[in-house]
């Protein structure tokens, strides 16, 4: 399968714990995006990378959130001191560079905060 | 920022009938409009997209129309089948690559 892969698929944790998710994009894509999707809503943009450079961050990305893409391949999204409101599906997408390139999504990581 | 509104939120059609989902956007600079299909527990899947230099695009039973003046675009599915049942999301982008999504339409095709 050469699509976008995310790990883990599900994460259950207690409030206040730190969590980290991983995304492996389609190998030919050098742009990688993180979105958050809550029940009944469309995905909301969080941040994106071109290669290893983080080029844009949404105001939704509080200081408890940090994303990295150290070698320009896979990316990690870490949430520190999780809160109830962080419960959501975290989706990763990737695309070729350039404007208006189709974004292809992974299956997401569903985070549940107890 | 961009605001995308999507209607209806739910849509039920008989198998074989057509389904139409409509979206409006607020930022006149938006120039890319993809549509995604999301089945329960699965990834959003790109089904069709349109750029602002064209008014209509068709791919088999799926078509998208764009009216830049009115700032709205629509998804048309003809000859619906039960496997078309899913949640459909429209999105808009100014080219900066972050997509702004609508709130989704749950389509149910009744056999």
Image (cartoon, coloured by chain):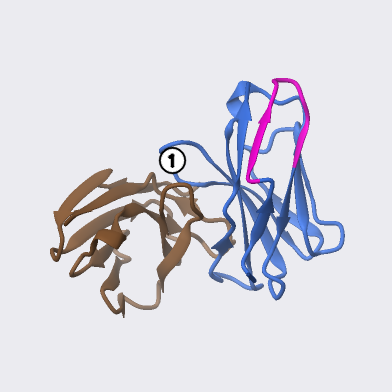
Chain colours: A blue, B brown
User: Quick check: is B72 in the magenta stretch?
Assistant: no
Q: Can residue B70 be seen in the rendering of this structure?
A: no
| Residue depicted at 46% across the width and 65% down the height | B46
Residue A19 is one of the magenta-drawn residues: yes
- Please report the residue visible at 43 percent of the width from the left and 56 percent of the height from the top: B91
Specify whether B43 is left or right of A113.
Answer: left
Percent of width and height locating residue B29: 46, 61
Dividing the picture into quarters, in which one does residue A65 lie? Answer: top right
Residue B70: percent from left, percent from top: 27, 60
Asked whether the viewer can see residue A1, the reply is yes
Kindly indicate the quadrant of the structure image that contains residue B60: bottom left
Identified at 25% across, 44% down, the residue is: B10
- In the image as oriented, which residue stretches furthest toward the front? B111
- x and y, in percent, of residue A97 in the image: 66, 72
- Which region of the structure is painted magenta? A9-20
Position of residue A114 measured from the top left corner of the image (x, y, whole percent): 63, 21
Please give left or right for residue B96 compared with residue A14 in the image: left
Depth order, front residue of B79/A65:
B79
Q: Is residue B37 above or below residue A84?
A: below
Mark 1 Cα-neighbour bin, 10 Å: few <14, some 14–19, many ≥20: some
Which chain contains the residue that carries disc 1? Answer: A
- The image quarter containing residue B13 is bottom left
- Residue drawn at (67%, 53%) of the image: A6
Q: Which residue is mark 1?
A: A41
Relative height, residue B15 to residue A68 (above, below): below
Quadrant for the N terminus of chain A in the image = bottom right
Question: Element under label 1?
Answer: loop
> In the shown orientation, is residue B18 left or right of residue B29?
left
């Amino acid at each position: 399968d050469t699509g976008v892969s995310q790990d883990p698929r599900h994460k259950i944790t207690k409030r206040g714990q730190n969590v980290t998710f991983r995304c492996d994009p389609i190998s030919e894509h050098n742009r990688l995006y993180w979105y958050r999707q809550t029940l009944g809503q469309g995905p909301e943009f969080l941040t994106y990378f071109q290669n290893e450079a983080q080029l844009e961050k949404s105001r939704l990305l509080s200081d408890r959130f940090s994303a990295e893409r150290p070698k320009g391949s896979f990316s990690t999204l870490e949430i520190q001191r999780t809160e109830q409101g962080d419960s959501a599906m975290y989706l990763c997408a990737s695309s070729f560079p350039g404007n208006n390139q189709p974004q292809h999504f992974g299956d997401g990581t569903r985070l549940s905060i107890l | 920022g961009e605001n995308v509104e999507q209607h209806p939120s739910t849509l039920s059609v008989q198998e074989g009938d057509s389904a139409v989902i409509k979206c409006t956007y607020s930022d006149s600079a938006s120039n890319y409009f993809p549509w995604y299909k999301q089945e329960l527990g699965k990834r959003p899947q790109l089904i069709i997209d349109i750029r602002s230099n064209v008014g209509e695009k068709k791919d088999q039973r799926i078509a998208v129309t764009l009216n830049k003046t009115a700032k709205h675009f629509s998804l048309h599915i003809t000859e619906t089948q039960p496997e078309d049942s899913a949640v459909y999301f429209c999105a808009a982008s100014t080219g900066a690559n972050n997509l702004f999504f609508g709130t989704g339409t749950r389509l149910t095709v009744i056999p």
